[in-house]
Amino acid sequence: NVLTNYAELQNVVPNLVVNDVLDLYDGKDTTQAQYDPRAPEEVQCKQLSQQMRGSLLRQVGGAKVAGIKFSAKTTLEVREWPEGMPDFAHFNDDMWEGKSRDERAKEYPKIKLKRYRFPRPFALSSLPTRDISMQSIENDDGEFRLYQGVWRMQPLPGCAPPGKQAMRLTYAVEISPRAYLPVQLVEGRIVRDLCTNLEAIRNAVTK
């Protein structure tokens, strides 16, 4: 409820300077959503995504990078996946089989990002998931050529006191910044802000 209360996100997420709701999307029941199984997987994901509930948000984030005030704007298409995103919506990790973490870290930046091929947040396959995907619109005039991420929620049975509930929230994001952005500085700032955002969401849920 916190993450889909779109009009109030700026009151939860730190450093979110502007948060304008441009549109709200009605969605179908996931059992009624249709797609062409013969189409490429990113096309299948797009077809399903456009049938999910969600919103169109214009956001501006502000922060200090190396002592300099920095802001980044983007227009995001947000979609809610109550049964979780299908496997074909994610980048396939099979190509990393047999390679060390260091080898993967060197090779991953060379892979070109694709729209509707989302990163995969950490999750336990034995538990159900609920997802919220975010992707910058095509031809966005913001600081990122492509911004796409997934919030993933999983109930944690047996991990809360009697009468209470516990849930794991994880996030994965991929960005392709404009050429004029200092990538390493921006990347480091995003990593730090992500930790802050997760804590802020937890505090909003538990207060």
Image (cartoon, rainbow, N blue to C red):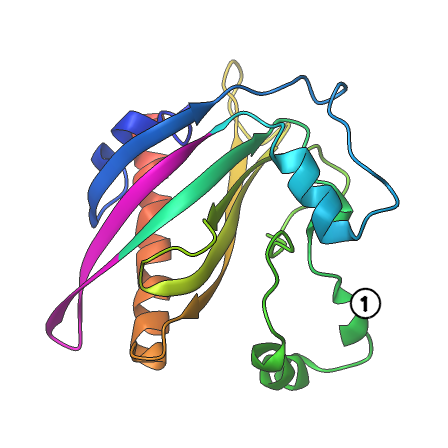
Q: Residue furthest right?
A: 38
Look at the image and tell me whether residue 171 can be seen: no
> Where on the picture, by quarter, is residue 140?
bottom left
Asked which secondary structure carries label 1, the reply is helix
Q: What stretch is highlighted in magenta?
A: 55-72
Q: In this rendering, is residue 185 above or below 33?
A: below
**Kind of residue at badge 1:** Asp
**Where in the figure is residue 112, as x and y percent of width and height?**
60, 73
Magenta stretch: includes residue 149: no
Residue sitting at 30 percent across and 76 percent down?
181
**Where in the figure is residue 59, as x and y percent of width and height?**
28, 45
**Where in the figure is residue 32, as x and y percent of width and height?**
75, 18
Q: Mark 1 points at which residue?
A: 94
Would residue 117 appear left or right of 76 to someone viewing this image? right
> Where on the picture, by quarter, is residue 159?
top right
Number of dots carrying numbers: 1
Magenta stretch: includes residue 71: yes
Q: Residues within 10 Å of mark 1 (few under 14, many from 20)?
A: few
Q: In this rendering, is residue 38 above or below 114?
A: above
Q: Is the magenta stretch mostly helix, strand or loop?
A: strand
Residue sitting at 49 percent across and 19 percent down?
164
Q: In which quadrant is the C terminus drawn?
A: top left
